[in-house]
Every structure is written in structure tokens, then in C-alpha cells.
Amino acid sequence: MMFEKINYIHQNPVERGYIDEAEHWRYSSARDYQGIDRLLEVERLL
């Protein structure tokens, strides 16, 4: 269920038409999950 929620949050800007891919959203933790430089450190609990 947690992964479902994270995916939903990552896809919001895509669904709204702001960007084409979740990793393109500058403030998204999707960047961290893809290994792309990010603005803030993401702490993973898993």
C-alpha cells in the first residue's frame, strides 16, 4: 500500500500535464528513486 501511495504522489504532476515523466518534476522524490540528483535527501525506511 505504501508503494501505491508513493507512486500516486509521483504521478500527480504527470497526470496534471505539468511534465511528461515524474523524474522531470524538480521537487519530486521520484528523482531519488531513479538515481538522479535531487534537491533534498530522501530517507528510506525500507
Image (tube, helix red, strand yellow):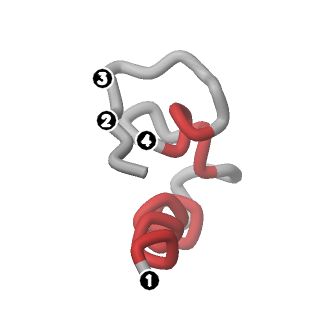
Where residue 43 is drawn, which disc sits there?
2
Q: CA distance from mark 3 to mark 4?
A: 8 Å
Q: Which residue is mark 3?
A: 40
Q: Earlier in the sequence, mark 4 or mark 2?
A: 4
Q: Is residue 37 left or right of residue 28?
A: right
Q: Which residue is mark 4?
A: 29
Q: Residue at x 66, y 36 (%)?
A: 34
Q: Residue at x 49, y 59 (%)?
A: 10
Q: CA distance from mark 2 to mark 3?
A: 10 Å
- Mark 3, other Cα within 10 Å: few <14 / some 14–19 / many ≥20: few
Please say if the residues under marks 4 and 1 sit with CB atoms less than 8 Å apart.
Answer: no
Badge 4 marks a residue whose secondary structure is loop
- Mark 4, other Cα within 10 Å: few <14 / some 14–19 / many ≥20: many
Please say if the residues under marks 3 and 4 sit with CB atoms less than 8 Å apart.
Answer: no
Q: Residue at x 50, y 70 (%)?
A: 3
Q: Where is residue 23 drawn, in percent x and y? A: 61, 40
Q: Which residue is mark 1?
A: 1
- Residue nearest the observer in this picture, 45 or 35: 45
Q: Amino acid at mark 3?
A: Leu
Residue at the far bottom: name it: 1
